[in-house]
Image: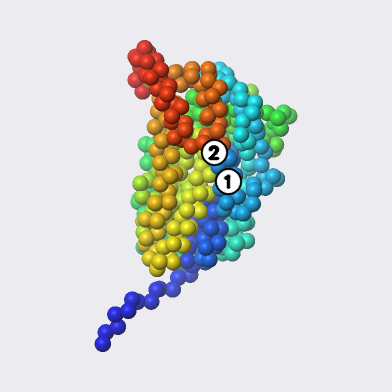
Amino acid sequence: MADLSPPAATACDFDVIVLGAGPAGAAAARTARAEGLSVALLDKARFPRAKLCGGGLTGRSARYFQDIFGSPLPPALIDSKTAVEFHAEGQPLGHLPQIPAMHLTMRWSFDAELVARALAAGAADLTGQRIARIDPEGPAVTLADGRRLTARVLIGADGVHSAVARALFGQAHDRARVGFGLEVEAPAAPGNATAPLRIDFGAAHWGYGWHFPKSGSSTIGIGGVQARNPHMKAAMADYLALLGQDPALPVKGHHLPFGDFPARPGRGAVLLAGDAAGLVDPITGEGIAYAMKSGQLAARAAARALAAGAPATALARYRAALRPIHRAIRQARAIRLLLFAPLFRPAFLSAFRRSGHLRQLYMRLLAGEIEYPDMARAVLRRLPAFLAGAVRRGKTP
């Protein structure tokens, strides 16, 4: 009589391979280990490594860090700020001396801490390994030294230029919609310890500029939708000059997903997390919180799929878990039209200058104390005034 029992599962080197060891990947590896899975954590870099990023850690980031890594943010890794200045086109929009704590970190140290915690939890250390080939059907990864590693689930947490996303879809992001940022690390000014954060709306088109004064340096940058900023280097030089910095400081650039997330963050047993999944706030540009959370959710989806003996169901489980984040990003994209589109921008800036409540809402949003539905209600209450102002000016976006 024929044996009708299901075939035995093919042996794999790991339950989960996580490609990319930034906040999304480290969170995924740590969570997968907490779920009892065998994990390989891969990255082309050894940690610590340089990473271009403003290093802002919101209250949301702090909560996710504690939930995933089991302790509060280490004080040695952060500078905390409780004041902010807003500007637009070189003119002050308002100063808030008391805001929910906003933490600043250097990604060199922060990411190394996350990786160390993932490895301490038992993830196999395959950092410093370059990838020669990704097989989404395996899933499997071939290293540059010829080793082929197999897994039942692959999590791509390898950034905005994700090799995993390219293997799945042929490209990592939509060039017409992706954002771009320029940034410098300037020497720390004597007053950095007490200096407030600074945010400049309009330093880049459909974006903003930032000055984050830290104990060891000042992180200064601008970011916006790439297609709307053909002269971003000149805009960055202007912004540095505005802040009294040398416009000739070495500038580095990087792409930002800026809320351009794919409807399907993966395929079957292959999942995308963090920047690879486009999970960056399209208004604030903040991505660390969603990176950590999506890494956690991807690992949990993998664990549930593997427990059910159905690795290919990982994506469906992950998409369901991501719905609140996707909904928040969609809401943010709608609000972004009111903040940055030329049709509405003058009215928004006028309201922002007059309304301390609106400024506080913005910072509470950044701190993770409120979500975009709360911000949307506040903005919608002002929509008739925005529209009236636009009609008077007779402008179009």
Mark 1 packing: few (<14 Cα in 10 Å), some, or many (20+)? some
Q: Secondary structure at mark 1?
A: helix
Looking at the image, the residue that sits furthest to the top is 392
Please identify the residue farthest to the bottom as the structure is shown: 1
* Identity of the residue drawn at 40% across and 59% down: 314
Q: Are marks 1 and 2 in contact (CB under 8 Å)?
A: yes
Question: Image height check: is 194 above or below 174?
Answer: above
Colour logic: rainbow
Question: In the image, what residue type sits under mark 2?
Answer: Gly
Q: Quarter of the image holding residue 46? A: bottom right
Looking at the image, which is closer to me, 383 or 94?
383
Q: Secondary structure at mark 2?
A: loop
Quadrant into which the C terminus falls: top left
- For the N terminus, which image quadrant? bottom left
- The residue singled out by tag 1 in the image is 63
**CA gap, disc 1 and disc 2:** 9 Å
Of the two numbered discs 1 and 2 on the same chain, state the one appearing first in sequence. Answer: 1
Depth order, front residue of 130/216: 216
In the image: residue 212, left or right of residue 268: right
What x and y, as percent, mark residue 36?
53, 66
Question: Which percent across, then down, holds residue 104?
Answer: 63, 38
Q: Which mark is residue 368?
A: 2
Measured as percent of width and height from the top left, residue 49 is found at 60, 49
Q: In this view of the protein, which residue sits in the foreground, 376 or 33? A: 376
Q: Amino acid at mark 1?
A: Arg
Image point (37%, 46%), residue name? 262
Task: In the displayed orientation, state which residue is furthest to the left.
Answer: 1
Q: Position of residue 45 (x, y in %)?
A: 56, 54
